[in-house]
Amino acid sequence: MSGLDETHDPSRTSWVGSANGHPHFPVQNLPLGIFSAQGTGRRVGAAIGDFILDLLTVGSLLDEDWLDDLSHPVLNAWLARGPQDQRALRRRLSDLLSDEQHRDDVEAALLGQSEATMHLPCIVGDYTDFYVGIHHATNVGRQFRPDQPLLPNYKHVPIGYHGRASSVRASGEPVIRPNGQRKPPEAEEPVFGASRRLDYELELGLWIGRGNRLGEPIPIDQADEAIAGYCLLNDWSARDLQAWEYQPLGPFLAKNFLTSVSPWVVTAEALRPFRKAQPPRPAGDPQPLPYLQGGSAEPALDLTIEALISTEQMRARGLPPHRLSHGNASAAMYWTAAQIVAHHTVNGCNLQPGDLIGTGTLSTDSNDGLGSLLEISRGGKQPVTLPTGETRSFLEDGDELTLTARAERKGFVTIGFGECTGEVVGLA
Amino acid sequence: MSGLDETHDPSRTSWVGSANGHPHFPVQNLPLGIFSAQGTGRRVGAAIGDFILDLLTVGSLLDEDWLDDLSHPVLNAWLARGPQDQRALRRRLSDLLSDEQHRDDVEAALLGQSEATMHLPCIVGDYTDFYVGIHHATNVGRQFRPDQPLLPNYKHVPIGYHGRASSVRASGEPVIRPNGQRKPPEAEEPVFGASRRLDYELELGLWIGRGNRLGEPIPIDQADEAIAGYCLLNDWSARDLQAWEYQPLGPFLAKNFLTSVSPWVVTAEALRPFRKAQPPRPAGDPQPLPYLQGGSAEPALDLTIEALISTEQMRARGLPPHRLSHGNASAAMYWTAAQIVAHHTVNGCNLQPGDLIGTGTLSTDSNDGLGSLLEISRGGKQPVTLPTGETRSFLEDGDELTLTARAERKGFVTIGFGECTGEVVGLA
């Protein structure tokens, strides 16, 4: 495991008490985000325990050269600077939050997370969603195309498509149940109305850092450097709209009413201890084409990802959220993040700082690792039963769906992604 | 034909001599665009004859309230103001360019188009491409799915998908032949290399003006007001990449290496005299669902669109470009621009000022009205012969492809869209 430094040292603690042992934000994490609080506009912050460190307020303790790009109300300009500056800022923040030397000044720049509102970390120029979860692709393919669940291109091409950037929102945005056309199987003609098969999709998001110029692909051995950080991503989906509209050009209104992301950019640097080799391809699978081979020997991430549901009834009865699924992200991913970036740009397509790329739904091959209700309920045929006795084939109004992720490895401090959550709201 | 005013008066002429009888830019057009010239940054201009009127330079002659939004290097803020201000600016420019009253001041703000570089008129937040050309959909569908050229949803759903915003460029951008995976029909495995089936697509583009908030659809009777203007759009396509990658999520690398648009925003107001009723649906076709019915009685546009090719050999021999196709846009469109906007937002998806929407390839039902080489050459089986004796199934390096459009109607002055052009460049 190369490139580890004192910021990853598991013995390092912070003088911010809540950080030590924090499930998401110990001093080994230090994700970046955009927050606002009463009386402030949007500002760049780093999460530490239950607090946010306001970076501009401690600007005099940072490299002067960084301040212009850290003074925007979004992270695009900062992430565009590339990995060297990301690493340097991380080191500096880690020192400031563990050493006592500047404690008074730094403590004055802390704000409780409960007092802040988190925003989308970047202006998303483009949002692309991939489909690298092979078990998801197989499970869904079986429902849409029983005769051929996995298409012949799947093991050669990291399949992806363009999503809608304007409707990407930070965690917490209400999920307004979309209207649209659906065609019930028994009907001759489509009908119009609110979706009856509203679903979530458990995904990781990649935030692009430096990007590339039009016409200049990012080779796979440079692809990791283009990824500034990661988040959770919920690709809310209206399955009934999707089934009717998606041929031949792919999903459109079934997806573009909302995409939610967790607000903290967990940096590639913070995730370095959790990198590992990509699981080998099953025997008999084709080798990737040369442009998709090579790069880091540890391109995968050891991440546990979870989806939880909380219904109105559960909340009224004081019950905790119910876990719908949990699994390891890498076990779900047939293609790595680096392969995604190399493929996306191989034709010359330009990625820009702050672009968002979703992995696609990450389901494992286990029944408790399915990343959508479409899979869990077998297309609605086997509803899941919740602790209240309620059942769910798809999401109902008032349901709150939460995604979470953590990176854990023996000998290192566990770090988390925070949450990506949204509550379904019926049409007025 | 409602809403015509003195700006549409065919007897109105400009004191800019080249405007009178100009094939694109008489005083009845006045499209807006972003230009730069030696020593200037990007600025808002209006085309008049062979010239560009620099709007900020005549700022003292315009409504003071407009100047902030006209001083950006892109049109997004100006288009966001909605149709009333578009109309008022048009009236003012028309008066300034036809009356002699302020001629000296206005003349000093003119710049030759040959001295300027045109840029993308807006920052494109999102680019969506539709598929409303029913003859194109049928022709292409026949090649990809001979058994079912037009899918069952086509006459119910205005099919669309998200494109790549970062690679939208103004006319003139070189078309770098993209690399990618393709699977020759006889091969067991895909191969990697430069596309051998590079194509153009003749489309119209819609520039969004005011837009809508997330969760608040634009009803069809307000949809026309959301469209600030129109342009030509070439959705460059690598057919061999597309055939291999497009299942199940739609085209991706086959399209996102470049999309070109003509640089002038021809305003909805300028096109008002050329509006007409939508041709009736063929007998037996289903009625649109209610959210796609209503709105303007004249939702279609009387536009003649053309595609022309010029090869290196043709240019070396001094031959003019060869017309590959020409036809009427409305005759090609199964769904109107207003239906496109109503459908795109019906699920709550938000359009933003400066968003770009393509119609999809506009082929007529005639052999001389096919909007792509894929259709003209019948998938490569029947190459077209050019005046030099050269043949083309798809585009070759050095080919220059130009789209153009004009609106003409008896009793009115013809206006044009200018050109959307690009030359194919081989990989280095």
Image (cartoon, coloured by chain):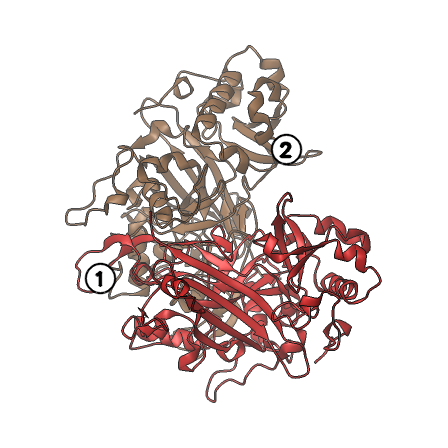
Chain colours: A brown, B red
Q: Is residue A428 above or below residue A311?
A: below
Residue A177 visible in image: yes
**Quadrant in which residue A143 is drawn:** bottom left
At a point 54% along the width and 69% down the height, the residue shown is: B340
Judge from the rendering whether residue B80 lies leftward or rightward of residue A313; answer left or right. right
Q: Where is residue A230 shown, x and y percent of the image?
A: 43, 38
Q: Which quarter of the figure is the N terminus of chain B placed in?
A: bottom right
Q: Secondary structure at mark 1?
A: loop
Q: Is residue B251 above or below residue B136?
A: above
In the picture, the disc for residue B184 is 1
Indicate which label's residue lies in the foreground, 2 or 1.
1
Residue B213 visible in image: no
Q: Amino acid at mark 1?
A: Pro
Q: Nearer the viewer, residue A420 or A355?
A: A355
Q: Residue furthest bottom?
A: B283
Q: Residue furthest top?
A: A101
Judge from the rendering whether residue A147 lies leftward or rightward of residue A323; answer left or right. left
Name the residue beneath numbered marker 2. A115
Judge from the rendering whether residue A48 lies leftward or rightward of residue B353; answer left or right. left
The crowding category of the residue bearing disc 2, from other C-alpha atoms within 10 Å (few below 14, some 14 to 19, many at least 20), is few
In the picture, the disc for residue B325 is none
Q: Where is residue B47 shown, x and y percent of the image?
A: 66, 61
